[in-house]
Amino acid sequence: MANIEIDAPGTSQLLIGNEAIARGALEAGIGFAAAYPGTPSSEILGSLAQVAKKIGIYAEWSINEMVAIEAAAGASFAGIRALAAMKQNGVNVVSDFLANLVMTGTGKGGLVLVSCDDPSAISSSNEQDTRPAAKWLDIPLVEPGDFQEAKDMTKWLFDLAEEMGTICMLRSVTRIAHARGNVRLGELPNKPRKAHFEQVHDLRNVMPTTFIPIPSPFRHLLLHIKLDKAREKFESSPFNRYVGPDKPELMIITSGSCWLYSQDAVEALKLKDRVGILKLGTLWPLPERFVIEHMSKSDKVLFVEEIDPFIEGNVVELAGNFPPNAARPVFYGKRSGQINAYGELNPDMVIKAIANILGLTYQPRDIDYSKKAEAAAKSNVPDRTMTFCAGCPHRATFWSIKNALKLDGRDGFVTGDIGCYSMALGPAGFFQVRTMHCMGGGAGVANGLGKLGQFGFDQPVIAVVGDSTFYHATIPALINGIYNQSKFILVILDNSATAMTGFQPHPGTGITAMGEPTKVVSMEALCRSLGAHVEVCDPFDLKATTNTLLKMMTEDGGAKVAIMRRSCELVRIKKEKPPYKVHIDIDKCIGEACGCDRLCTRIFLCPGLVWDKKAGKSKIDEVICSGCGVCVDICPQGAIIREAA
Amino acid sequence: MTKKQLTKDPLNLIITGVGGQGNVMISLIIGNALVRDGFLVTIGETYGASQRGGPVMSHMRISQNTQYSPFIPDGCADIILGMEPVETLRMLGKYGNPNVITIINPRPIYSIDVTGGHSQYPELDKLIETIKELSCQTWLINATEEAQKMGSHMFANAILIGALTGSGVLPLDKKSVEPILRETFPKEIETNLLAFNKGLKLVKS
């Protein structure tokens, strides 16, 4: 990660959108930041935590998004500027708190929520658009269109949030959050604020000094007045602008990374003198006068946005209030089918939409070349399915789960959750996972399944969660399973890190976001204190792990816990040398003649093991193999050899 | 500082490989060197889920005056740095054109689909031939092999950065890249510099 506290105003740095947001927060004089890791949002808190100690702010990885936003609100109530960052799913988690926070208002410290959405769900379970949440929760919403704006907007949003006395939301998407671009730095403030929760003890004068959402209708009215004020500011915001001819044949209305795609598309089609782009940075409340003024320039309007028709819906709603005989443009977008209402967009999709509306053709490369290149790629490029890394303890765990379920023979299955181990739904985890929803969802689903005995259900149910997911959202489901005696095994994949999102620490690791040692919240002590039968396994010991799981499946009683403890291999290799040097004994490996159906390369599928077609034997790819040595125990011929490295 | 001129604006570079190879690191080093030399650079990367053995690509747009989007439009790549050969061909299929320049490390990384027998990895010689046919110019850099001679395959990235710099296709030279390498690899800088210089040399021979 880039160093975001570099004191060099005016210099240009190459930052990802998330680092730019973090820098903007620093330039705004933020004092408190909290988040739960989630792609594509994690680097916001990550980069703040890295510099927190040095510049005297506080940053934490909270146990989940709900606690993150509540903690940040606490800081705001005491006059400290605060930020909470999360991925789109997190906004669902915090919505209950937000629905009340908008009623109470925030404190003297501006409070900003950053939501990083993931169109196409590149690193997510869904591609939810969080912008509508700002509308139904009455929260002022902005969206940066590039990296510079990500910084500048964040800084400005703290001023707005403080002035309005309400939480403000910045929405980003993967292609801003995780893309890199130039950011010219501004000044860093050096006057820390003093935190104090101001109290007025004359409670008859209660309104401005407590954070209680009653009387609700009156608070709701006040909130609407705040939003009207925000709308008025948005009408003249420099983050909204029009670039194009005075009377364009087509007007694109866009925001976020789609603004960049729209510019690329207009340039590729050489239409700068025919197509105009109205770029919105402040999305809710909609700056209506500004939109109407520019929209009236053209009789064709195309909405380019990800993912829901949010701007489109709001503008069409606005046009619905035009006088009956007023001119209305023809609207193109998701409703008319020119732009997909699912998946992320890119410049080519916008090119296609514009070309379709204006009746143009577009051919970026020579047609013969195109055919040849596409055919060559199609017939030669093999699939490359994602998998667990070489040496990943999850592969070993799912191997044991698979074998234990098979040995048990009652058609047992796995309910899954969110993390690297979600990949177990595919070949990486031998297709063991049958359900996947939200954080903690697998254990919740298992609670229901585990109570179906009276209806003849006797299949073993294994709910699999990661260590960070366990702390985040699984503990209530486990308590429920013990209290209501639901029959399932909770398998916790404890790899000592929030691996999928970049190895962030969590309550089980004994280290804070700012690198300070802290108390370890022991998952086994916690589970035992709840009355659960707990086993701790080393997933690399395939035999013992399989036997433990098999035994637990046949035991009576409510929810049980099996902890699979092994460090994430990507974390381990940074600290230690490989434990083993692994090679194939080519005399012992008899390939297809073995009868094992090439267990190692066809079933176990560690990428460190490859098939030497010419020799007809397995082979170790020394560039990939991390030397964990687990594959030695799966080979029926004993042909895989590990020697201490 | 006198800015070197771009041969084309925007200049579109793709760095492609397999998750875990260090794709993001290369784009970061090249990108930082260009930003320090006064260019506007946008980099779009696939990472997160794609890092676990999946195909990974970085799109880099280099311009004197515009902050371009993080996606290169189809058929519009100018240079492809291929850390792995079939991934290079995957990119040519979508982003290649008769003027594209390719720099490739020919060391295959087999996917689980290939080892599992569900997909075929093409014969290497034919694959390289196809890449050459679809490129205006191709440099073959045996980066993994050379890196292993230096003690670890991990040095392949510095070799490729050297080759990309030395090829002259980017407005970059040794002087711009070396300081960034020093900042990025403070611990193993000596070997990384050796590898970088090896790449500079290999691309010229």
Image: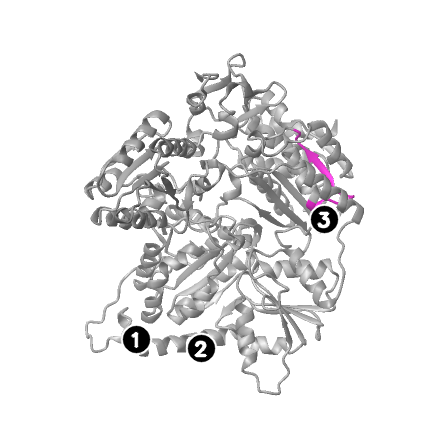
Tag 1 residue: A216
Q: Tell me the crowding category of disc 1: few under 14, some 14 to 19, or many 20 or more residues within 10 angstroms, Cα based.
A: few
Q: Are marks 2 and 3 on the same chain?
A: no
Chain identifier of the residue bearing label 2 in the image: A
**Does B127 lie within the magenta span?**
no
For the view shown, which residue lies furthest in the top direction? A587
For the point 32% across and 45% down, the residue is A470
Residue B180 placed where, x, y %?
58, 38
Label 1 SS: helix
Report the disc number at residue B75.
3
Question: Is B188 above or below relative to A138?
Answer: above
Label located before the other in sequence (2 or 1): 1
Is B28 left or right of A35, judged from the image as shown?
right
- Mark 2 to mark 3 CA distance (whole Å): 47 Å
Residue A143 placed where, x, y %?
51, 62
**Does B100 lie within the magenta span?**
yes
Residue A393 placed where, x, y %?
40, 32
Question: Is A61 above or below relative to A129?
Answer: above
Residue type, label 2: Asp
Question: Is A483 above or below relative to B131?
Answer: below
* Figure quadrant of residue A530: top left
Report the disc number at residue A228.
2
Stretch in magenta: B94-106
Is B82 left or right of A415, judged from the image as shown?
right
Q: Are marks 1 and 3 on the same chain?
A: no
